[in-house]
Image (cartoon, rainbow, N blue to C red):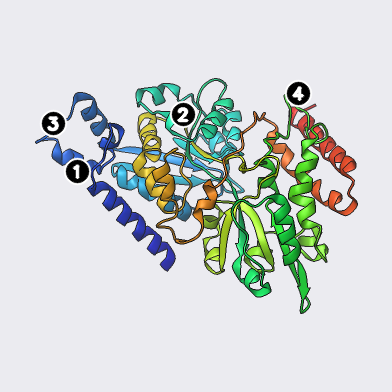
């Protein structure tokens, strides 16, 4: 609770500072506190267009923001909710996250209000398949949003998913980094990982950190396999244009599995003791702390903030392939879109417009949220006012993003089959059989989804 209050105080201080400082540029002139703008109107009448925008911002509006991302209300408020309420004091913001029992389908069936929805690139397409989306192109143009100022890969990705329109706007970004437990490296006298490592170097480091001491098994390295596969550095989709699995068709998958999964994890002395035989994972890194290195989402520190607060950790850039240096994971952005049923589309658009403004993006960057504005100054602020100030936040931008391939509607069905292909390969070194089984599993899942 104390930590949460501290974070909230920091956010308020940043907002007060931002509102009291001068802004530059046409778009930023309207990003100050609305009440101050209203007070200044009598002495400094704004242009007609500016006046209309200010009046619209001051008009009361009720906005329901929905997500299936799993973000708690506390997490949402710390990053977005309180920021929006401070900027638009006359807007009533209601956050409705999905639960296991009540999700998007139930909301639609009950006719409940949704004005803004948000989710990551891995799940945003589910909203489109449920016909929640609207093409925001006209609103984007009328509000003068310049999407060329954003990270181009995340804009291109949503365009690919939007049938020629733009169904949502990126608000923050994500990628994959390598976390490590500093205490374990200190205990075993091994040098820390560093930015710019190759996968071969990571494999050697994993060897050094994998050991059994005093009856305790220590593991050198593991990954959040779904994220690493979905955001793979080779830009390989799970499914091709013919809606068939690629794992048994593209030879690059073998190299990827070998370097990222098999080689660095082949040193384990007793694999079966971790995660019921599926290898070490989150608990081994955060709880039992017998996992030295873990590849995971760069934003995960906010989801498990208390766990990370209670360990001595840092991060470095994702290791890269020797024949493709400097290329990290694909981006994993989160998009905000306007529901076609919203009765407050203009108000919803003003919220999204604000969230990608320099003011809001600077605030998000300072508290450690990876910005989407392609601005070196804003990127340099990353983490400077976060709960984890002093960590190597620069690791997030050390590599360039891998291109995002075109992904079809059945892409998400590949997560499980591709994940389960890892363990047979590790045990038998039989790539052909493991890849064939994974492809058959995915292709059958696609048929089932089509009702064939």
Mark pair 2, 4: CA separation: 33 Å
The nearer-to-camera label among 2 and 4 is 4
* Residue marked by disc 3: 45
Q: Where residue 30 sits: x, y (%)? A: 26, 36
* Residue marked by disc 2: 341
Q: Which residue is drawn at 80% across and 41% down?
A: 254
Secondary element under disc 3, as helix, strand or loop, is loop
The nearer-to-camera label among 2 and 1 is 1
Mark pair 1, 3: CA separation: 13 Å
* Residue marked by disc 1: 36
Mark 3 vs 4: CB contact within 8 A:
no
Mark 1 or mark 3, earlier in chain: 1
Identify the image quadrant of residue 346: top left
Secondary element under disc 4, as helix, strand or loop, is loop
Q: Which residue is drawn at 85% across and 35% down?
A: 440
Identify the image quadrant of residue 10: bottom left
Nearer to me, 331 or 346: 331
Q: Residue furthest bottom?
A: 214
Q: Residue at x 42, y 40 (%)?
A: 375
Nearer to me, 184 or 174: 184
* Residue marked by disc 4: 242
């Amino acid at each position: 609770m104390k930590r949460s209050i501290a974070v909230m105080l920091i956010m308020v201080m940043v907002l007060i500072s931002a509102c009291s400082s001068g802004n530059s540029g046409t778009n930023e002139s309207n990003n100050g506190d609305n009440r101050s703008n209203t007070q200044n109107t009598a002495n400094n009448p704004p242009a007609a267009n500016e006046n209309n925008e200010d009046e619209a911002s001051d008009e009361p509006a009720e906005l329901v923001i929905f997500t299936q991302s799993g973000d708690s209300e506390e997490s949402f408020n710390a990053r977005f909710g309180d920021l929006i309420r401070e900027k638009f004091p006359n807007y009533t913001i209601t956050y409705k996250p999905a639960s296991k029992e009540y999700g998007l389908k139930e909301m639609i069936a009950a006719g409940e209000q949704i004005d803004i929805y948000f989710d990551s690139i891995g799940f945003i397409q589910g909203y489109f398949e449920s016909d929640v989306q609207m093409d925001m192109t006209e609103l984007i143009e009328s509000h003068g949003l310049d999407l060329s100022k954003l990270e181009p890969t995340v804009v291109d990705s949503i365009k690919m998913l939007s049938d020629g329109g733009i169904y949502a706007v990126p608000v923050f970004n994500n990628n994959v980094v390598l976390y490590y437990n500093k205490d374990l490296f200190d205990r075993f006298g091994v040098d820390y990982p560093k930015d710019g490592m190759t996968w071969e170097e990571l494999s050697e480091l994993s060897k050094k950190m994998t050991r059994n001491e005093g009856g305790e098994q220590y593991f050198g390295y593991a990954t959040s396999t779904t994220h690493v596969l979905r955001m793979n550095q080779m830009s390989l989709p799970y499914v091709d244009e013919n809606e068939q699995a690629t794992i048994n068709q593209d030879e690059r998958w073998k190299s990827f599995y070998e370097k990222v999964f098999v080689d660095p994890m082949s040193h384990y002395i007793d694999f079966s003791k971790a995660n019921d035989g599926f290898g070490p994972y989150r608990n081994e890194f955060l709880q039992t702390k017998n996992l030295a290195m873990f590849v995971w989402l760069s934003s995960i520190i906010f989801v498990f903030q208390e766990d990370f607060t209670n360990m001595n950790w840092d991060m470095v850039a994702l290791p890269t392939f020797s024949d493709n240096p400097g290329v990290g994971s694909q981006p994993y952005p989160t998009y905000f879109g306007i529901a076609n049923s919203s009765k407050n589309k203009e108000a919803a658009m003003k919220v999204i417009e604000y969230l990608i403004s320099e003011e809001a993006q600077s605030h998000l960057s300072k508290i450690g949220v990876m910005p989407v504005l392609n601005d070196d100054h804003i990127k340099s602020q990353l983490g400077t006012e976060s709960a984890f100030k002093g960590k190597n936040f620069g690791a997030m931008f050390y590599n360039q993003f891998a291109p995002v391939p075109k992904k079809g509607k059945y892409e998400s069905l590949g997560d499980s089959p591709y994940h389960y292909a890892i363990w047979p390969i590790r045990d038998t070194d039989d790539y052909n059989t493991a890849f064939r089984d994974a492809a058959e599993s995915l292709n059958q899942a696609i048929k089932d989804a089509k009702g064939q």
